[in-house]
Image (spheres, helix red, strand yellow):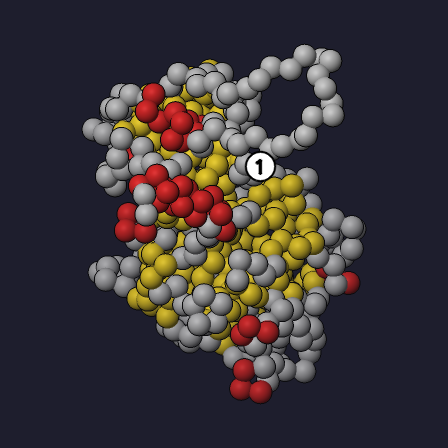
């Protein structure tokens, strides 16, 4: 096969195949009912049903090793001061044939089982159910209210009401005399968050523990008070079965449940969950991490970035990132306004890489921003580099001109260039985070000889650069368009 034919064949694969490729957590991310992800001493931790949990050094590759005594089910965790409070359910949920459950809490100074400070306190009971009442004390969710520092725990399953109790943030015990409040039905595995003036109650709806046939999904209601009422977008009370969809099955993963919220700041938010069945991993229950978007005041799961060939479009004005090369005109026979409209109509081929690449310089080529015309110098193929590790919720990517190895690269003076060949150097690896408004932040893994954490910005209509990220500025936001 001729070299040019091979290149055209590869380009076709990139265009038609890569755009369909997504990524999920790697390593051994096998877990059920995961707690909200906690960061501790540079590592990430989440705990699940049973005694164990997962640990990740970068938020992308997960393996076993987390330690949580007490057994039971569906834990949650929150950091309060310099300690971590862990809550979990003992029995309940129909486990062992009944709904007589208990919610317990315990403290630890660190989540690192290899630390000399690692020691859980004795667990204390903060809520219970007798198996007969309209509640099942299992599936706790913790909220430390940022407004007043009060600590709340929601719990319950389909067997009756979801309930809310107040805990003491200093002891982890139930506030003396505090009565449980009913706040929802028809869900389980609830979690509470506070954002932009509202309290949000996230609940898991549907059936679980049925693998590929599980119908789990996550719904939400909101309230101006932590005690409710929690209404959905149609005004339905979650005490009457209301709830707006946040995330359902997709990308060959079935049954998302057990919401956890991670607010990274700068307009970057993530959600954790488990999927009851990942069809690409033997149908096992796996950890999922998705971006969180906000639409008209409601949280919704964003999409994991998918490999593909794209226009990289600046939110600032809609112009596109491109190589700074001479514009090569396409052959075109001019027609006047009185052209013969009876001429046969035929499709014109798009400009190809082979038609223009020879006009480009052979060394490094700078980049700029210009009008998008789907020309070869404006089309970027983005693929994951699995061996380079990752960050919370994604791998690092390489960004190259489609059909070539010419790679977008950060320079030592915090500018941008492209080099002829991708080598895997840190300055050629890119982090891509979806922001809460649906646009993207693009950041190099490293800038040579610098510890600065800069993002790709549009410093002017035609000038890309690297600078501190500002989530309130369209200069720092990008879109990926597949044309």
Instruction: Answer with left or right where residue 439 lies relative to residue 119.
Output: right
Q: Position of residue 138 (x, y in %)?
A: 56, 72
Residue identified by numbered label 1? 437
Picture layout, residue 461 above or below residue 75: above
Residue at horizontal 48%, vertical 71%?
Answer: 283
Instruction: Answer with left or right where residue 56 lies relative to residue 101.
Output: left
Picture layout, residue 10 above or below residue 337: below
Crowd band around label 1 with a 10 angstrom C-alpha radius: few (<14), some (14–19), many (20+): some
Task: Report which quarter residue 441 is drawn in.
Answer: top left
Residue situated in front as seen by the camera: 111 or 117: 111
Instruction: Confirm whether residue 289 shows in the render.
Output: yes
User: Which element carries disc 1, helix, strand or loop?
Assistant: loop
Quadrant the C terminus occupies: top right
Picture layout, residue 179 above or below residue 379: below
Instruction: Answer with left or right where residue 391 lies relative to residue 192.
Output: left
Q: Position of residue 329 (x, y in %)?
A: 47, 18
| Count of picture labels | 1
Residue at horizontal 62%, vertical 69%?
Answer: 215
Residue at horizontal 61%, vertical 66%?
Answer: 216
Residue at horizontal 60%, vertical 33%?
Answer: 347
């Amino acid at each position: 096969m001729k070299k040019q034919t091979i290149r055209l064949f590869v380009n076709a694969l990139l265009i038609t195949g890569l755009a369909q490729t997504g990524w999920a957590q790697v390593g051994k991310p096998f877990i059920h009912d995961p707690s909200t992800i906690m960061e501790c001493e540079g590592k990430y931790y989440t705990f699940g049903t049973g005694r164990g949990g997962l640990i990740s050094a970068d938020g992308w590759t997960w393996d076993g090793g987390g330690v949580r005594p007490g057994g039971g089910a569906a834990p949650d965790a929150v950091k309060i001061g310099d300690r971590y409070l862990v809550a979990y359910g003992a029995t309940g949920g129909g486990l062992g044939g009944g709904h007589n459950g208990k919610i317990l809490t315990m403290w630890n100074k660190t989540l690192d089982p290899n630390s000399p400070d690692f020691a859980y306190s004795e667990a204390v009971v903060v809520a219970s159910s007798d198996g007969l009442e309209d509640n099942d004390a299992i599936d706790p969710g913790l909220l430390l209210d940022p407004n007043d520092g009060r600590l709340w725990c929601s719990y319950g399953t389909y067997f009756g009401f979801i309930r809310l109790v107040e805990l003491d943030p200093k002891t982890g015990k139930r506030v003396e005399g505090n009565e449980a409040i009913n706040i929802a039905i028809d869900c389980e595995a609830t979690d509470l968050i506070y954002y932009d003036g509202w309290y949000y109650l996230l609940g898991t709806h549907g059936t679980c523990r049925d693998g590929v046939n599980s119908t789990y999904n996550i719904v939400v209601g909101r309230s101006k008070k932590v005690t409710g009422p929690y209404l959905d977008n149609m005004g339905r009370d979650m005490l009457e079965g209301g709830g707006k969809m946040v995330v359902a099955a997709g990308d060959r993963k079935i049954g998302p449940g057990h919401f956890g919220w991670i607010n990274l700041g700068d307009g970057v938010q993530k959600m954790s969950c488990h999927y009851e069945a990942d069809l690409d991993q033997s149908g096992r229950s796996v950890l999922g991490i998705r971006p969180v978007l906000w639409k008209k005041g409601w949280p919704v799961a964003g999409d994991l970035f998918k490999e593909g060939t794209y226009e990289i479009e600046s939110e600032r004005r809609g112009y596109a990132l491109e190589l700074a090369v001479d514009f090569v005109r396409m052959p075109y026979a001019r027609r006047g306004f009185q052209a013969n409209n009876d001429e046969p109509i035929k499709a014109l081929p798009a400009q190809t890489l082979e038609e223009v690449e020879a006009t480009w310089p052979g060394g490094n080529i700078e980049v700029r921003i210009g009008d998008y015309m789907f020309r070869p110098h404006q089309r970027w193929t983005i693929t994951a580099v699995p061996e380079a590790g990752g960050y919370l919720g994604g791998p690092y990517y390489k960004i190259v001109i489609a059909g070539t190895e010419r790679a977008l690269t950060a320079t030592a003076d915090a500018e941008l260039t492209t080099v002829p060949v991708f080598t895997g150097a840190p300055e050629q690896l890119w982090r891509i985070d979806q922001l809460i408004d649906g646009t993207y932040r693009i950041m190099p893994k490293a800038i040579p000889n610098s510890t600065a954490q800069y993002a790709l910005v549009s410093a002017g209509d035609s000038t890309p650069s690297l600078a501190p990220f500002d989530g309130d500025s369209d200069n720092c936001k990008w879109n990926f368009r597949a044309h």
